Image (tube, rainbow, N blue to C red):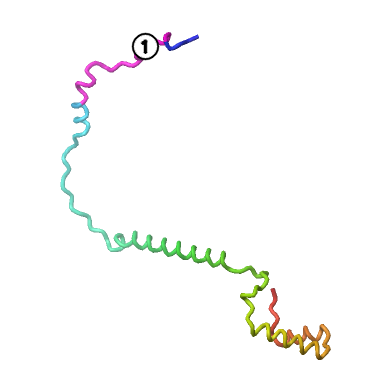
C-alpha cells in the first residue's frame, strides 16, 4: 500500500535552460508590431449611423406591445365567468325584479318569457 512517505518527492517537471533569462526578449519581439500608418476617418452614411438606434427603438416597441398584450390576456375575465355583485348595478336588479313581478302577475308561461327576452334584446349568449 502506498503512503505519503513512499511518494517520490522530486518534481516531475523541469524548466528549459535559460528560459527565464531570454523570456523578456522573446515577449518584446512578439509584441512589437510595425508602426501603423494614420488612416483617414471613414465617413458613414446617415442610414448606417441611425440604423442601430432604429433597431433598438423597434425592439423596445415590440417588447412593450407583447407585454401589453400579455397583460390584457391575463387580466381579461373568462367568458363563462359568473357575474359578481361588482358587475351588477342597482338599475339592472330593479329592472329584473319589475319584469319578474309583471310576468308573475300575468301568469305567463316560459315560452312567453323567452319570446319577450328575445324581442327586448336583453339576452346575451355565452
Q: Which residue is mark 1?
A: 9
* Rendered location of residue 8, percent (x, y): 39, 10
Q: Over which residues does the magenta segment extend?
A: 5-23
Residue visible at 66% across and 73% down? 83
Residue visible at 28% across and 17% down? 15
Which of 95 and 9 lies nearest the eye of the viewer? 95
* Rendered location of residue 96, percent (x, y): 71, 84
Which of 27 and 64 lies nearest the eye of the viewer? 64
Q: Is residue 5 above or below residue 47?
A: above
Which secondary structure class fits the magenta region best? loop
The C terminus - image quarter: bottom right
* Rendered location of residue 16, percent (x, y): 27, 17
Residue 14 falls inside the magenta stretch: yes
* Rendered location of residue 89, percent (x, y): 63, 81
Left or right: 64 as drawn, with respect to 35: right
Residue 64 placement: quadrant: bottom left
Amino acid at each position: 500500500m502506498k503512503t505519503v512517505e513512499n511518494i517520490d518527492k522530486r518534481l516531475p517537471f523541469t524548466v528549459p535552460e535559460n528560459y527565464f533569462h531570454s523570456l523578456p526578449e522573446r515577449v518584446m519581439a512578439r509584441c512589437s508590431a510595425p508602426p501603423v500608418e494614420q488612416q483617414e476617418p471613414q465617413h458613414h452614411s446617415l442610414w448606417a449611423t441611425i440604423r442601430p438606434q432604429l433597431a433598438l427603438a423597434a425592439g423596445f416597441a415590440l417588447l412593450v406591445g407583447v407585454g401589453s398584450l400579455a397583460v390584457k390576456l391575463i387580466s381579461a375575465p373568462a367568458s363563462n365567468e359568473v357575474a359578481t355583485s361588482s358587475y351588477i348595478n342597482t338599475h339592472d336588479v330593479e329592472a329584473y325584479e319589475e319584469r319578474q313581478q309583471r310576468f308573475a302577475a300575468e301568469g305567463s308561461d316560459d315560452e312567453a318569457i323567452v319570446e319577450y327576452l328575445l324581442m327586448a334584446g336583453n339576452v346575451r349568449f355565452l
